[in-house]
Image: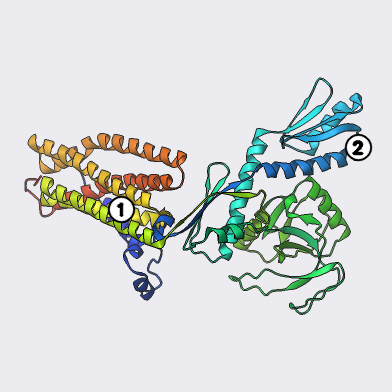
Amino acid sequence: MPYLSRWRLILVFGTCFLGLWVGLANFLSKETLNSLPSFFPQEQVTLGLDLQGGSSVLLEVDTKNVFKDYMASLLDEVRRVFRQEKILYMNLRLEGGTVLKFTPRNPEQQEKTLKILRNLVEGVHLSTADNGEIVMKLSDVIVKEKEDSAVKQSIEIVRRRIDEMGTKEPSIQQQGNNRILLQLPGVSDPAQVKELLGKTAKLSFRLTHPTMIPHDPKTKSAPPGYEVLQYDEDKEENIPRYAYFVQKKTDISGEMLEDAKAGNANGQDVVNFKLDAVGARKFAEITKNNIGRHFAIVLDNKIICAPRINGIIPNGSGYIEGNFDLKSARNLAILLRAGALPAPLTPLEERTVGPELGSDSIQAGKLATLISIGFVLIFMFVFYGFLFGGIANICLVMNGIFLISALTFFGATLTLPGIAGIALSLGMAIDANILIYERIREEVRNKQAPLNAIGEGYSRAMATIMDSNITSIIGALLLYIFGTGAVRGFAVNLGLGIIISLFTAIALSKVLVMLWVRGWGRNKPLPI
């Protein structure tokens, strides 16, 4: 005989209240939300491009350019080390973007040469041909890491560029290995987007003047070889716009930065950074000769940080300290990583969706969903009566509310295929109730007591319910993994709907049925 414990009641109804609270804003107008107290939830489901109109651009990251720059830098470093170690060589060249070849003039120096190269750079395969030629090739792991890093860095730069437009709720997603899907609600001209992304975000490390500091931020004149640059204004923290005389000559370019991330040193939040081999050598020389001087980090001709050089940094790794908290340290690390586009972005596809079409899609989607739900509600009342049909319909309505709340909580974007996924998941959600009710009917026909019939009905239907839902979840998961764009939106909504239906059909419906049996339905036959 099933037992209805207090903790189960609290858990089930508490979950229902939480779902209603999170999704509340989606059922109210903007004007009503603005008039409510601030503690009421304000977040609503973000509508996709096909529902509210705007522009969509599919970009491809040319990762070949990443390896070209990296190998060119490596080539210069190999030349420098060979001169330093007095290694004689000939025919040093690059092939295929990821392969470096040369021939040592003195065969007796071959082992020494290989040892030097192993210590110089990690993640390369070294091999020797029959003619004595040495081949350096980037490993597959390094190639994959640099491709992934280039795409992620490009996404960060694209996001910064799009933010300058003031576009509300842009969607920037990676598609496949080297593509970026950019969706901009409310932007009707893709050419404007491509022009914005065509700008070069330039990062550089430059020394400031050793003694002179402009007292007026509006100063235009500067000593020979210097220019006046201002701090980038942080609107959130309201940081004043300081200015420095900064060398026009770039000491270290953003292309030499390998990584930057937030960290901690001496109990303070800092930004750790790492330069490549060429940048590390230059950085060591600069820090050795300019202790006590400020070293400005310049992004798009705006100073984002000007730390003081406190000592020699020989290995190209160091940290930037200042009045950082964890958030500002992370933001600075992102700015450093996203300083310059690591590779060109090529537009592959662009399209524009008008707001009228999006409005029509919303209305059509609403109508189709309401009609399908209406037929399901009528079906359940007709076949399972007012009590059990009503409980199933309550669970169905809660399923829809939970689904909207989940999309709101996770910040998911609702698209037209997503509406189709919601309609399908709501139709599938009622299947579990039907399986349970048919089992209960079977137990009632076998002369079981009401409580026993309910308990047996739920327990015996469980295996079938789990089998059918798990196979559907696997299908949704595969669509999400191998699909892109709209297909993924459909898969997300379908998967969430199936998971939520397990809660509403099994937990919520059972609690409601048990409450009726132990209350108004005590000692009465089950009306099913």
The residue singled out by tag 2 in the image is 85
The residue singled out by tag 1 in the image is 11
Q: Would residue 511 appear left or right of 381 to someone viewing this image?
A: right
Residue drawn at x 73%, y 42% as measured from the top left: 68
Amino acid type at mark 2: Glu
Q: Can I make out residue 16 in this image? A: no
Name, please, the residue furthest toward the bottom.
216
| Residue closest to the eye, 72 or 318 | 72
What is the quadrant of residue 36 in the picture? bottom left
Please tell me whether residue 89 is drawn above or below residue 205 in the rendered image.
Answer: above
| Residue closest to the eye, 308 or 425 | 425
Q: Would residue 91 appear left or right of 479 to someone viewing this image?
A: right
Residue 409 placement (x, y as % from top left): 41, 57
Residue 342 placement (x, y as % from top left): 67, 49
Lower sequence index among marks 1 and 2: 1
Disc 1 to disc 2, C-alpha distance: 72 Å
